[in-house]
Image (cartoon, rainbow, N blue to C red):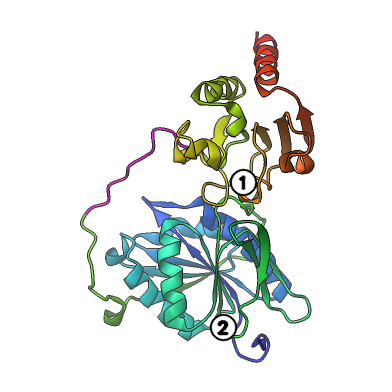
Amino acid sequence: MNSLIGKTDHAGVWVFCEIINGKIQDVSLEMLGIGRQLADQRGHKLYAIILGHQTETYFNTVWEYGADIIIDVDDSSLLCFNDEDYAAILLRLLRKYKPEILLAGATANGRALIPRLAVLAHCGLTADCTALSIDQETGALLQTRPAFGGSLMATIRSDGFLPQLSTVRPGVMKAMKRKNPHPYELIKEEIIASDLTNLKRVLEIISEESTENLQSNAHVVIAGGRGMGGKEGFDLLHKLARIVDGAVGASRAAVDAGWVSYGIQIGQTGRTVQSRVYIACGISGQMQHLVGMNSSDLIIAINTDRNAPIMKMADIAIVGDVFEIISKLIKMFETIKG
C-alpha cells in the first residue's frame, strides 16, 4: 500500500470524546493521552471532538488532558447518542478539516459509530487496538491489536486512505494531565439539517448494571482462573480483595464455567485493567487474557505450573498451592491491620 502521508493537506490528530450521562468517559481521556504523544511526534495539533448538549462543562477537562483545539457541536438533539446522526456530523467535519488520524474508544458506542464513519469516509479502520505508534520513516500510524483469536499481535497500517481511524480498548492507555502553557482554541460548529437522518429516535435509556462488576481503574486486582476450582475459590479472593481494598477479576475460563459473572472477565473479550498490582491466581495466561492486564505496574502470578505463560511474564512468580498462599496473605494482612 502506498502511503498518502505527507502527500495531502491532511493534518492533526482527533480524539472523539464520548459523553455518557453527563460525564466524559475515562477511555476518552486515555485517548487524549496517546493522541498527545502521536500529535507531538507528527508535529501536529491535538483536537478534542465533542458532540452533545451543554458541552461547555467539558472544555477545561479535555484541555487539561492534552487538547490544543476543541471542535464543539452543541445541540439538544445530540443529548442521546445516535450513531447515524453522529456519523453524519463527523463525516462533514472530516471533509472540512481533514485530520490525519481519528481515535475513539472501543466501547459499545465507539464500535457502532466508527465503523459506520469509516465506510462513509472510504478510509481504513483498525478496531480494538492495544498500542499505537508512528512509523518514523513514513509518518504512518502503526496500529497493534490481537489477531487470530488472540494467538498473536498484528501491527496494521491504513495510510493508503486518510484519515486513519482506530478504536482502542479501554484501559490500555494512560490518561495524563499536563501543564498546558497555551489556552485551548475553540471551534464552534452548528448542526445542519442534513446531519439529522431521522432514521430512529431514542425514547428512553435504561441502564442495567451487573450484580458483579469490575472497575477498570482499580489499584489492586486479584484475578482467578480455572485453578480456583469453583465459586468457593473466588470467595477466598473476595475476602483478600476486601482486606486490601482491591477488586476481583477472572479469566474467561472461570466465567465460562459459571463460577463468576461476565462483568469481571479480563482479557480480549472482557475488560482491560491497568492496576498498580495484579495478582493472577490459578491463571495459565493465554494471549487472550494477557492483552487485558499486561499494562499493570506489578504482576504477581501464583500457579502450580512454573512453565505457565503467566509465570514467564510476571514480575513475581510464586510456584505453589494458590489456596494455601492466598490464605497466608489474608492472615498476614489481617495481622498488619490489627
Percent position (x, y) of residue 238?
54, 24
**Mark 2 vs mark 1, CA separation in Å:** 33 Å
Residue that carries the numbered disc 2 in the rendered image: 162
Tag 1: amino acid: His
The part of the image, by quadrant, that contains residue 183 is: bottom right
Residue at image position (62%, 91%) is 8
Q: Is residue 207 magenta?
A: yes
Q: Is residue 299 shown above or below 203? A: above
Tag 2: amino acid: Leu
Q: Is residue 241 shown above or below 45? A: above
Residue 116 in view, yes or no: yes
Say few, some or many: other residues with alpha carbon within 10 Å of mark 2 (under 14 / 14 to 19 / 20 or more).
Answer: many
Which image quarter is the N terminus in?
bottom right
Q: Secondary structure at mark 1?
A: helix
Residue at image position (73%, 38%) is 298
Residue that carries the numbered disc 1 in the rendered image: 289
Residue at image position (26%, 80%) is 193
The part of the image, by quadrant, that contains residue 151 is: bottom right
How many numbered tags mark residues here?
A: 2
Q: Nearer the viewer, residue 289 or 181?
A: 289
Q: Secondary structure at mark 2?
A: loop
Q: Nearer the viewer, residue 159 or 326?
A: 326
Closer to the chain start, of discs 2 and 1, is 2
Percent position (x, y) of residue 264?
50, 38
Residue placed furthest toward the bottom: 7
Q: Nearer the viewer, residue 5 or 254?
A: 254
Q: Is residue 38 magenta?
A: no
- Region rendered in magenta: 204-214
Which image quarter is the C terminus in?
top right
Say few, some or many: other residues with alpha carbon within 10 Å of mark 1 (under 14 / 14 to 19 / 20 or more).
Answer: many
